[in-house]
Image (cartoon, grey):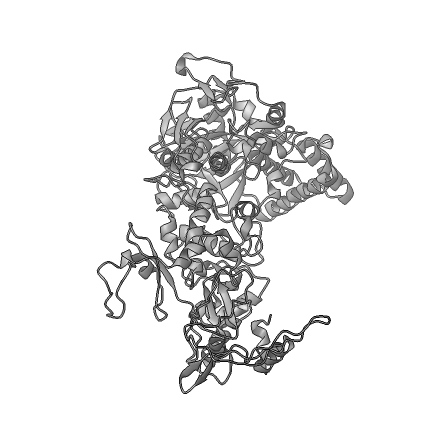
Amino acid sequence: MLSDADYSGNASGARRARKRSSGESPGDGQTLRSSGRQINVRVKRTNNPPPGQSKRKATDTEEEDDQSEKKYRKCEKAGCSATYPVCFASASERCAKNGYTSRWYHLSCGEHFCNECFDHYYRSHKDGYETFASWKKVWTSNGKSEPSLKAFMADQQLPFWVQCTKPDCRKWRQLTKEIQLTASLAATYRCGMKFNNIKSEGPDQCSQPEDLRVAEVTDSWWHSMLILPPLFKESPASPFLAAYYPDCVGMSPSGSASNASLTELRADHCRAVQPQIPGLCPYFQPFYQPNECGKALCVRPDMMELDELYEFPEFSRDPTMYLALRNLILASWHRNCKEVLTAQKCALHIIVRGLVRVRCVQEMDRVLHFMTRKGLINTGVLAVKRPLLPERFCSRNVIIIGAGASGLAAARQLQNFGSQVMVLEARDRIGGRVWDDTCLGVTVGRGAQIVNGCVNNPIALMCEQVGIKMHKLGDRCDLFQEGGQATDPAIDKRMDFHFNAILDVVSEWRKDKSQNQDVPLKEKVQEVKKNFLQESGIQFSELEEKVLQFHLSNLEYACGSTLDQVSARSWDHNEFFAQFSGDHTLLTKGYSVLLHKLGESLDIRTKCPVQAIDYSGDVVKVTSNGSQWTAQKKNMIQFNPPLPERKLKAIHSLGAGIIEKIALQFPYRFWDNKIQGADYFGHIPPGPDKRGMFSVFYDMEPQGKQAVLMSVITGDAVPAVRDMEDKEVVDECMKVLRELFKEQEVPEPLHFFVTHWSKDMWSQMSYSFVKTGGSGEAYDILAEDVQGKVFFAGEATNRHFPQTVTGAYLSGVREASKMAAM
């Protein structure tokens, strides 16, 4: 069968040659036109039989007596359900309409155009040629796909279909050719709606039956018979994806005129420029730009992810329809994350011609439910009035143990999905390792307060939903020695280089090392440093050695442990995965605002420590007797049956990192002249034995009036202060501050607090780390459910984003998704 491309040059001659080769005369079965009168004739066939068979008796040419009998040609597409195709185009005066044509062109089962209308646009001497040529110029300038005449017909000539918005109707209607579909029209359309002052006929247009072709669209085979994928016009995703060829991401290249700068941008394969979209939070970057990689929670707009392919295998061969829908949904959500995004809202923005719009609207439900279940949309602190997912996705009763970030995230998601959820929390408050204190005049997090990397971070999303501003932390961190001297930035830069070079050598060393060959990170760092000094002949000065100790204390801050406990092979295991990029910020209002918003309307029972979990039967039983129950600090919850050995081994391979904090309120900001508006400053330890003792001081309101400093205690300094009274810890901190600001008077603090996470009965830690001999796989094993009954969340179950509130939150979203899928 000939394709559109075959009809170039002397195409009519090609058709004649083809007919003759099959034994047909040039005019076989054609409708002859003369003076406007149509006469159907049958032409004598001259088929030559194969050897050995006798010739059939020839039939003389005769005129049909019954004018109602017509001769039809079937659709070109094998398997097309259209017995008698009808031309939708009606472009040519000689359009076959529902009669005979030498060839029917198939766009879908139910949408065809005749050869006469093909010629009307394709032939250079025909009236429609200029229209096709102009479209083709725009298409080739903006897109990559072939500008065939079929593509032109689908993009420009097919009629739009729109659904009646009347709740008891919802029938699909075909608009007349001259009517352009818009989102506002789709939102208000009702059967029989008047256009251009034309009155509708009949008292109730909704009573008219729906076109029979619409019912076919829902059948699974219909999509496989679609010749061209749908390409949306005016998609909400368009501003996000200006650097892509539209037809590679589910959008029509004819949607806008050719733009020289865009053409240049698409041709430049070295740049990855984020589009600036007015009114959009700059931290919302849901799509990778061309040649961009390594960003967390980012998707390729031109490619399906593995979990998407698993969920929608029917789109694996041609993902265009799925990509068009998914990109539209993601863009719409990030444009307005404060309201529930529904399939009905998204459907209004599906602007595409033909019956395929019906199919796209039908598929929208599935795609939107999938993305909701995965926590890609309709997530965060969103409050819903009705379940977000169909009933089949809802677990009937769920008990969540712990009202930290992960527990609240799972509870919020599951309740929004439609499940009945109860949260049991041992403490008298929610938040877990998030605990904000306002007693010093500003919010200071006793636990987490910093967001590391805000681009696509769900914490940034929740801040946008609640209306909280995030304070961007600056890069400047001046280092001060005891005695008050500021450290030369050149020395800091040089030692930072050596520090990172040591870690680079450790990274090279571990490439071919098995888990059994692991060593403590402290041992490996010392070995690499020693070898470097011996081989290079370099000797660090006393100050340089102290600056190196400062950077090592930061490493212990990141790990939450002394380096002799940390795996040299897996200390930064999560860096192999895409991480959150962009600004590091301080939540000046604290994380608690977000977590309390997550907990709104949830059934949370505080002061309810859990004693036992029995999952031996069909129903999981959780035993809690509140304050009357007492237990040892380890193995607080008894599992029946016991947890699998694999999971217990993973638990033991992770360490419980400890970071303590101290916050001090002063009568005035004595540090301003020296720090000059920086968000923090560093303390160079006088020796290795003092490393980690107040290594960094954060100004909790750098642009404000409050005089509050917060510092951290890490590494070997943690056990040193464990049994000290709070006032003793404060005295030690004040000694350091008076050394750093020796040239001036440092006042006594008005108020203060010191944390004791190591003694916290329910946490006993700040965040996890991989112990020597362990691996990042332990996080994945901890995340595994047990028998589909007991599920696990928390930062220590998130291999990609451990040690963070973000990781804890996402683990809760992950488990809610798993439970909904089951």
Residue furthest to the left in view is: 203
Q: Residue at x 60, y 23 (%)?
A: 644
Q: Is residue 198 above or below residue 614?
A: below
Task: Determine the residue located farthest toward the bottom in the rendered image.
Answer: 35
- Name the spot of residue 567 as percent of width and height, x first: 66, 32
Res 22 quadrant in image: bottom right
Q: Closer to the camera, 533 or 744?
A: 533
Viewer can see residue 674: no
Name the one closer to the observer, 616 or 801.
616
Q: In this view of the protein, can residue 358 be seen by the observer?
A: yes
Q: Is residue 608 left or right of residue 584?
A: left
Would you say 154 lies left or right of 182 here? right
- The x and y percentages for residue 413 are 42, 37
Question: Residue 594: horizontal and vertical position, in percent?
Answer: 39, 37
Q: Quadrant of the N terminus?
A: bottom right
- Residue shown at 59% from the left, 63% from the top: 269
In the rendered view, tell whether residue 290 sits above or below residue 750: below
